[in-house]
Amino acid sequence: KMETAHMKCQAAAQVQERKRKGKKNGKGKGKNKGKGKGKGKKKCDVDMDALSGFFSGVWEQKACILREVGWVNQEGEIVPDNIMADIGTLDTRMSEGLADTKELCAAESANVTIESMFSGEEFVQVEIQNEDAPVTSDDDCKIKDLDQEKVADIEDSLKKLSYVACVHGNFMTACGNFILEQMGEMVRFMTEGGFTSLTAQN
């Protein structure tokens, strides 16, 4: 189910990328129109629109797949109960180890902020800047001085991405434990003469 959803969304993403490149190639190349070079108080030059678009784009790529399997609704919101319902279809030894996924991931994602993601209030180590903007100094960019509506949009995407990453991480841990348990049972079977007794029976 997940593989089919991935292939469908990958095909759709390729179509959108071709359309985006077509629009980009059709645009003019004018620069710095209407921009003044006045001196004065320094300004934070982080491009919040680009940053918001980047994270919402990353989320939409993942949401496309998760929407196909019912983990995300049509409004783009995660549906934890559907995730837990699918977890319930796994081998009992795995599903029991994932029983805390809903609460664990809700708690983790609730604590995600721009500050926590970028390690501190200084918001200067960001790759996406206005094209001709100077590199900002430590005093130029602080979260409290940024467009709070854009900050909220970015944090919304980050929280969703964090939740999905948590589910994936929790699953991989449970899966690893399950495999180790199976290998342990196999080793015990071998060391306790399981193969020898089978040979004797044949």
Image (cartoon, grey):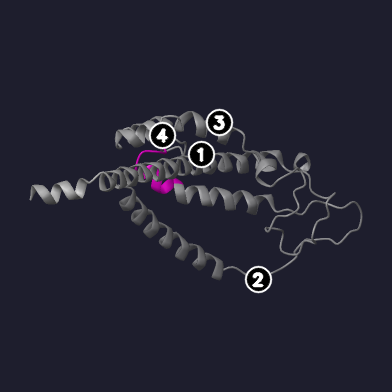
Which one is earlier in the sequence, the residue at label 3 or at label 1? 3
Which one is earlier in the sequence, the residue at label 4 or at label 2? 2
The residue to which callout 1 is attached is 163
Which one is earlier in the sequence, the residue at label 4 or at label 3? 4
User: Would residue 83 be counted in the magenta stretch?
Assistant: no
The residue to which callout 3 is attached is 107
Contact check, label 1 and label 4, Cβ < 8 Å: no
Q: Secondary structure under badge 1?
A: helix
Q: What residue type is labelled 3?
A: Ala
Q: Position of residue 41 (x, y in %)?
A: 90, 51
The residue to which callout 4 is attached is 98
Whether residue 57 is situated above or below residue 84 in the rendered picture: below
Residue at 80% x, 56% y: name it: 136
The residue to which callout 2 is attached is 29
Q: What residue type is labelled 2?
A: Lys
- 124 sits to left or right of 176: right
Q: How far apart are marks 4 and 2 (CA)?
A: 52 Å
Q: What residue type is labelled 1?
A: Tyr
Q: Position of residue 93 (x, y in %)?
A: 33, 34
Q: Distance between the residues labelled 1 and 4?
A: 14 Å
Whether residue 58 is situated above or below residue 94 in the rendered picture: below
The stretch of residues the image draws in magenta is 63-73
Q: Position of residue 110 (x, y in %)?
A: 58, 32
Contact check, label 4 and label 3, Cβ < 8 Å: no
- 107 sits to left or right of 78: right
